Structures are given as structure tokens and as C-alpha cells.
Amino acid sequence: MAGANKFFALTVSLLRYQGLSPKVHVVTAIRTWKPGQLHKAEMLVSALAGAYVTQEGFNLRDAGGNHDSKSDDSWDDHELYVFAAVDHFDKNVDWSTADLEKFKFVEESLEAMDGTIHRAKDGCVAEMEDVDADLLRLKQYGEDIDSAQLGQATVIQSLEAESRMWLEAMTIVTDLQRVARS
């Protein structure tokens, strides 16, 4: 139990004192191949495993304190293992590349939708201009001004509601593009 966490060693000792025979297995959780990675890997595994005392584990202090304990040869062995002996790294690269292709498709689709929305907005603006021109013509022909204004207000309200809908859609597309890029 030399080098083990004191809380863990005490627990194992108490179990042995009670006549039980606990078995301790030490395994590598994350194989790192550079000294700077070990600190972060230890922190990640400790947090995910609930190893801190505040998580009902045995670690009182933050993990990741022994990042320089390996010899230079063991780092080379780990690098060979990660990149050559097992296919985990290659699979991860393949899966990540496939995910990137999916995100690229989504981003292209969003950009195409963005163009459609802009064209629709431009069409709404042109439609509103046509309505105004029609109202001017009605006025020139002597139609009842009050009914024309009422009709214009109804059309304008309808077009304004539709414009708000398109603007909301553009906002959603912009947010989706931002998420897809991040």
C-alpha cells in the first residue's frame, strides 16, 4: 500500500482487520504519451469516477500531482501503444472525420436556407412596395380614401406579421450556423 492514498489504505486496512480479503486492481485508465497530458488525464478520470472525498471517493486533494514521475522511455512506449499497438486512435480519427462531414453538410444546408430567407424577405419588401403603389392608383381613380386606408392597414399588418416571422427564422438560422461552426 506504499504510495496509496491514505484514506484508501485505511479503508483496505480496516477491511483486512475485519477478516475480509479485499483485492486491489491497478489499471491504466487513460494512456498518455506526453508529460503535459498526464495531469489533465488524472483530473478527468478522478472527476468522472467520483474519486474525490466530496464525491464519496478517497481523494482529498486535486488529482494530477505526479506528472513528471515517468521516465522518457515509458513515454515512448506509451506513444507506440496509442498510435500503433491498438486501433483506438485511428477509429477516433475516422469517427471524428465522419462527424465533421455531417457538420459540413448541415452548415451548407443552413447557408442555403439563409439565401432563401433573404430572397423571401426581399419579396416581402417588394410586395409592400406594390401595395403602396396600388393604393396610390386607387386614390387617383377616386376610390374611397377611408376604405383604401383600411385595406392598406390590413395588408400592412399582414405583411408586417409575415416579415416578423421571416426575421425570426433568420435569427434561428444564424444561431444554428453559429452552433454548427463552434
Image: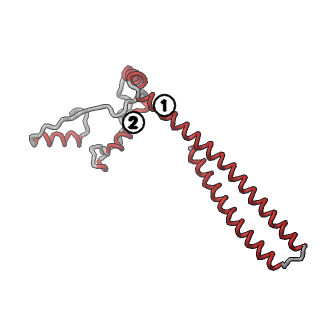
Against 167, residue 16 (above or below) is: above
| Of callouts 2 and 1, the N-terminal one | 2
Which residue shows up at 37% across the image and 30% down it?
31
User: Which numbered circle lies on residue 57?
Assistant: none
Is 102 left or right of 16, judged from the image as shown? right
Label 2: which secondary element: helix
Which residue shows up at 69% across the image and 62% down it?
163
Is 20 left or right of 89, judged from the image as shown? left
Q: Residues within 10 Å of mark 2 (few under 14, many from 20)?
A: some
Quarter in which the N terminus is drawn: top left
- What is the three-letter code of the residue carrying label 2? Ala
Q: How is the image coloured?
A: secondary structure
Percent from the top left, x then y, of residue 158?
Answer: 70, 68
Percent from the top left, x then y, of residue 48?
Answer: 35, 43
Using the rendered view, name the quadrant where residue 43 is placed: top left
Q: Which residue is mark 2?
A: 41
Between 157 and 151, the one lying in front of the other is 151
Against 117, residue 62 (above or below) is: above
Q: Which residue is mark 1?
A: 94
- What is the three-letter code of the residue carrying label 1? Asp
Which residue shows up at 72% across the image and 57% down it?
121
State how many labels appear: 2
